[in-house]
Each structure stands twice: as structure tokens, then as C-alpha cells.
Image: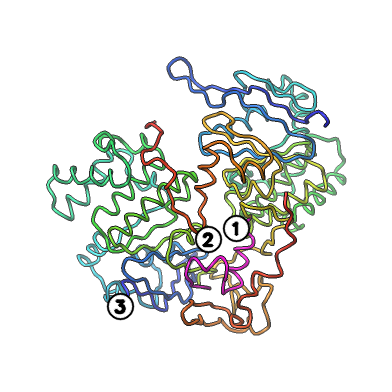
């Protein structure tokens, strides 16, 4: 098998110092191959979003190593040029499409801005690429001229996906990108993501707490808890034959027909008051 | 036995920019004492509006037609003291976000004992003893310490347990739970649902449970109502809903949701976007997105057809389509 596109080793992040130091990501390691789709599952506070933020350079790791396509990405880029080069490799889609778009910028301009930052294109070429991106995610000319307020949550998330794809990245991180959507719209976006991956060969790092969505969209999965990877493997195997008790607890917590909620959980919560 | 809660022909319009917009369209259902009824729908389907109307929490200027009877009394006839008693003793609400429904500068103990001290005229010491017992009931065993803490010192799951404790403190006959676990992690959701279900059964309270999650409603309610564009499209026993839906919308929802046990090549997504009640076309609100729609579906708002012993469906083709709704649309299954 070829070398992984993204390799993460012993990634660690702690916030605060001394007695207030808290280890948020603790020695996380995984690999993502070109065209692959890796799921990161975990509950709030498990460190999945912090991991994503380190991958795109929004946080500086305390320890560990990030290698993307043979280059060391552990520390944030030093120059604007290097920063943009990284932007062409990895992009992110956030959970909330209501706060992640500029409400005064038209959708088409939002996509054009990304194109102009990353590529030297003439005005006509930019226009053509914007329409092409719109087509790819299912936004028509009228929607490209609109402001975000005119679009529904699902349409906004299509914009966010188009914006991430505008830089033609090798990896797109989807951080709970379908969690805020209604079921009928969620299915549309999941299908769209599958199509795009097939057509463009882009890899996904898919962060979610929803095991059914993970099953649908990823090949491999890691389960995180308290900043550590507790289980890793092919998605079907992790979900069908979980070996770690925490993965089993997650699985058993999903509502289903003969559900006895809370039967597997301790009555006293383990967490301490913050 | 007559029902505890009867909702009959409820139509609600809210004022938006000077005109009245429809938010609920002919909602009727009954809920018997001690039963749990799920209200499922996507955003804008009218789930929260239904519950707010029942609790008489509609904004000024709302136009309401129809009846809501609680234990035989019309809720819209309640005035001052009677309305206060209804809201403080008969029904209580649990909201989605406990953090925005607790006062951040009051302690947990104040929050829990306030209703008992004011409505039940219980002395402070006795009230706080009862509050600690209540906390134990919802699985919080260090109640004395928790009573002295502030909301920000508790996690979302713990605070939601406190909310549940507060809402059952007065032993209401009806609990209105509006997405009580949506903001919680799955494992915490399971714990909270376990507690809520146990208290509901032990105290014999009726519960109207709102959620967008069909599986959660099916797992925790006796019966489930599915709402679309402000109207009821289906009512059925929860355990049948998933395998034998009556309305095409319910069937489409069941199919659009990815399955935890296997991967589907393509999810049978529902085309288009959910509509709200005021944008809904004449005729069946779901018709524009429905793969079974015919011309007659678009002509008049269909009636809610009762199917004896099973439930009800607002689809003109219910009889001919029954049992076939889940077939066909499923694309070939791919096992990993």
C-alpha cells in the first residue's frame, strides 16, 4: 500500500499550565490514505475538534507530528505563501452553516474570493469556476447571487462544501458538518459528499458523534475518549464488533426498538463538576 | 376513560410583519393519563408550537381556533388564578437547553425549591429535604453539595437532570418535553431518557415528547405523531412506525436516515426542502416532494383518515399504498 496522504503520530495538546493544565488531545495517531474516508467518533470534550484544528493550523500541537503528503505540518506555516500552499491541501467545513458564512457577502463572491486567493485566474475563468462549483454542489445561478440569509440550512452547508472544494484540496475535514441538518436534508448532503469523493478523489476526515452517519460515509473509524484513541479499524468492524467497552457503550446508547435507555450506564456520572 | 388531554381542530396563526401566518393546520389528538406520546417532525413542522399552545405560551396577537381540553376543561377558558394553577401544578415543561432556562446567578437549591415554597407553601427546610430526595431520584446522589452549586458548575447532562427533577417536583399530570436530550451526547441521552421514562411510569404522568429523531421517539413513546408543515400526517403505535409506516412522508424519513448496521450505496433522500405551514401549497403539503403524489393530492387538504386499531394517516392513497411504502426506493445494499 502506498504511503498515507496524512499521517498523525503522538499528537498531543494541552491547555493551561501547572495545576490548571489539562490534556485535551493525548497521543493521538492515525493515517488517512488518498481517496479514503476516516471517521472520528467521540462525545463532547473527547478532543476531536481540537485534533481537527491542529490539522489545519489553528492550534499548535504540544507534542507529536503531522505529516501531509510527505511534508511536515506539525507547526503552523511561517509565511503567507506557505499558509496558502497548505490551504490548497486541506480545507474544513464547520457544523453551523449559520455562523460560518459572511452574511454580507454574496455566495458567488464568497467562492470567487477563495479562487482568487489560491489561483491566478482571469475574471471569466473565476466566473466559470464559480458556476462549476455551484453545479457540483447543486446551487443554481440565482442562489449564487443571493446573500446567505436567503438560503436554508442545507443550502448553506452546500455553500460551505463548495467553498472548501474551491481551493481544490486533497483533504476536506467535515466537523459535524451534517449534524445540524434535518434528516431529509442530511441524506441529500451525505449523497452529495459521496458523489464528490468519487468524482474528485478527495479524502475526508469526518468528525461526528452520529454512528449511523459514520457508517454511511467512512471506511475507517477511530473512537476517541478523553483525548485518547480507544479503538480504531475498518468502520464496519468497529461498529459491528466493538472491542473497547466505551465503543460498546456508544453503540448501546443509540435508540432502537427494544431499547432500555441507561441500562448500561452508571447511575452516577463519572464527570466532576467543572 | 376519557383522555387527559384532548386537542381538537387546532389552527394557529402568528403575526409576522403585520400579517397572520399559519403555523398549525388542523391538529387533533388525544393523550390518555400515564401514556407517552411522541411528536416527531423536521424544523418548522410545528412540534414546538403545538406544545407552546398547550401550555398557553403563545406570543401576543396569535390567533387560535379549535379546542384544547385538559381533564375536560378548555385550556383557553382559564383565567388568572386557574391558569396559574394549570401551568404550575398540572403541566410542566422540560426544554432543550437547560442552561438558558435556569437563572445563572441562583443556586440549584433555590431553583428546585422555589416552586414548592411558593405553590405548595412548604417550609424551606422541608423543601430542601424533598429537593435532595428528588435529586437522588434522577441519579444525583451528592444532592447536598449540588444544591449549593450554580448552574455553570454542572455539565449539560447533570443540569438536564436537575430540570427534570424540578419539573416532576410538583407531580404534574402532564409533562411537555421539548427536545430534552438534543443538546446531549448519546450516552448522556440514554441516561437521561432512562430517568425520564422511569419517573414518567412510576408517577403515572402523561408525557408529550418532542423530538426530530424518529428512532428516539419510537424507542421511548407508546404512540408517535409525525408532523409536516404544521399538520399531523400520521399517528401510530411507535413500535410499528419504523416497519409499517402509513404515510409516504414517514416512510421517506425512515429511509433517508442512514442505518447503523449497514451501508447503503445511496441514501434515498427526499427531494426539495421541508416547507412551513404558511408556505405549504393547497392540497397535501407533502405532495411536491412525494413520489406517490397524484393530481387529486394537490387539489384539497386531505382529511386525517383513521385506520381502525392501527392509527391515522393524512394520505388519500393510504389504503392502496399500505405495506408498499418502504419497497422500491431502497437502492441496492452494499455490504462492506
Mark 3, residue position: B2
Label 2 element class: helix
Quarter that holds the N terminus of chain A: top right
In this picture, which residue range is highlighted in magenta? B234-258
Q: Earlier in the sequence, mark 2 or mark 3?
A: 3
Circles 2 and 3: CB distance less than 8 Å? no
User: Left or right: B270 with respect to B118?
Assistant: right
Mark 2 and mark 1: Cα distance apart in space:
10 Å
As drawn, the label of residue A183 is: 1
Disc 3 crowd rating (10 Å Cα; few below 14, some 14-19, many 20+) is few
As drawn, the label of residue B7 is: none
User: Left or right: A1 with respect to A162?
Assistant: right
Residue B220 sits inside the magenta stretch: no
Quarter of the image for residue B269 reads bottom right
Label 3 element class: loop
Circles 3 and 1: CB distance less than 8 Å? no
Mark 2, residue position: B214
Circles 2 and 1: CB distance less than 8 Å? yes
Residue at (61% x, 30% y) in the render: A51
Amino acid at each position: 500500500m502506498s504511503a498515507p496522504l496524512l499521517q498523525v503520530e503522538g499528537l498531543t495538546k494541552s491547555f493551561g499550565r501547572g495545576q490548571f493544565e489539562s490534556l485535551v488531545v493525548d497521543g493521538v495517531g492515525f493515517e488517512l490514505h488518498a481517496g479514503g474516508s476516516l471517521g472520528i467518533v467521540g462525545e463532547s470534550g473527547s478532543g476531536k475538534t481540537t485534533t481537527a484544528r491542529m490539522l489545519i493550523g489553528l492550534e499548535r500541537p504540544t507534542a507529536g507530528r503531522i505529516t501531509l503528503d510527505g511534508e511536515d505540518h506539525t507547526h503552523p506555516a511561517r509565511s503567507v505563501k506557505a499558509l496558502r500552499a497548505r490551504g490548497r491541501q486541506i480545507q474544513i467545513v464547520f457544523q453551523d452553516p449559520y455562523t460560518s458564512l459572511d452574511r454580507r457577502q454574496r455566495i458567488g463572491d464568497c467562492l470567487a474570493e477563495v479562487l482568487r486567493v489560491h489561483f491566478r485566474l482571469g475574471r471569466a475563468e473565476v466566473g466559470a469556476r464559480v458556476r462549476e462549483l455551484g453545479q457540483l454542489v447543486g446551487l443554481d445561478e440565482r442562489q449564487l447571487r443571493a446573500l446567505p440569509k436567503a438560503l436554508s440550512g442545507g443550502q448553506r452547508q452546500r455553500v460551505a462544501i463548495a467553498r472548501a472544494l474551491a481551493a481544490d484540496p486533497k483533504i476536506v475535514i467535515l466537523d459535524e458538518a451534517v449534524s445540524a441538518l434535518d434528516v431529509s436534508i442530511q441524506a441529500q448532503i451525505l449523497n452529495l459528499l459521496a458523489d464528490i469523493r468519487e468524482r474528485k478523489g478527495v479524502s475526508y476526515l469526518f468528525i461526528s458523534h452520529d454512528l449511523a452517519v459514520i457508517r454511511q460515509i467512512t471506511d475507517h473509524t477511530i473512537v476517541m475518549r478523553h483525548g485518547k484513541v480507544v479503538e480504531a479499524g475498518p468502520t464496519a468492524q468497529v461498529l459491528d464488533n466493538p472491542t473497547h467497552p466505551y465503543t460498546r457503550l456508544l453503540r448501546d446508547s443509540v435508540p432502537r426498538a427494544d431499547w432500555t435507555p441507561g441500562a448500561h450506564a452508571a447511575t452516577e456520572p463519572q464527570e466532576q463538576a467543572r | 376513560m376519557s383522555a387527559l388531554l384532548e386537542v381538537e381542530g387546532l389552527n394557529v396563526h402568528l403575526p409576522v410583519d403585520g400579517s397572520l401566518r399559519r403555523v398549525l393546520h388542523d391538529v387533533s389528538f388525544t393523550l390518555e393519563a400515564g401514556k407517552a406520546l411522541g411528536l416527531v417532525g423536521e424544523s418548522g413542522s410545528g412540534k414546538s408550537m403545538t406544545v407552546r399552545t398547550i401550555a398557553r405560551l403563545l406570543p401576543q396577537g396569535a390567533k387560535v381556533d379549535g379546542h384544547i381540553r385538559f381533564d375536560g376543561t378548555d385550556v383557553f377558558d382559564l383565567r388568572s388564578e386557574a391558569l396559574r394553577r394549570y401551568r404550575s401544578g398540572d403541566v410542566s415543561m422540560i426544554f432543550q437547553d437547560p442552561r438558558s432556562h435556569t437563572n445563572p446567578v441562583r443556586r440549584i437549591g433555590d431553583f428546585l425549591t422555589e416552586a414548592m415554597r411558593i405553590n405548595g407553601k412548604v417550609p424551606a427546610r422541608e423543601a430542601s429535604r424533598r429537593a435532595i430526595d428528588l435529586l437522588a431520584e434522577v441519579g444525583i446522589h451528592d444532592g447536598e453539595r449540588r444544591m449549593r452549586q450554580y448552574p455553570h458548575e454542572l455539565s449539560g447532562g447533570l443540569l438536564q437532570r436537575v430540570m427534570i427533577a424540578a419539573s416532576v417536583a410538583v407531580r404534574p399530570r402532564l409533562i411537555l418535553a421539548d427536545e430534552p436530550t438534543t443538546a446531549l451526547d448519546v450516552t448522556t441521552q440514554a441516561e437521561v431518557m432512562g430517568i425520564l421514562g422511569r419517573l414518567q411510569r412510576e408517577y403515572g404522568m402523561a408525557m408529550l415528547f418532542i423530538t426530530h429523531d424518529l428512532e428516539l421517539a419510537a424507542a421511548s413513546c407508546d404512540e408517535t405523531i409525525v408532523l409536516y408543515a404544521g399538520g399531523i400526517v400520521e399517528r401510530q403505535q411507535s413500535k410499528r412506525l419504523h416497519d409499517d409506516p402509513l404515510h409516504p412522508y414517514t416512510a421517506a424519513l425512515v429511509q433517508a436516515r442512514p442505518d447503523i448496521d449497514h451501508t447503503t450505496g445511496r441514501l434515498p433522500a427526499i427531494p426539495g426542502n421541508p416547507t412551513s405551514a404558511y408556505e405549504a401549497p393547497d392540497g397535501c403539503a407533502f405532495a411536491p416532494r412525494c413520489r406517490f403524489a397524484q393530481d387529486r393530492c394537490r387539489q384539497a387538504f386531505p382529511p386525517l383518515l383513521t385506520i381502525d386499531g392501527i392509527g391515522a394517516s393524512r394520505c388519500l392513497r393510504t389504503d392502496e399504498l399500505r405495506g408498499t411504502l418502504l419497497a422500491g426506493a431502497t437502492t441496492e445494499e452494499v455490504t462492506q
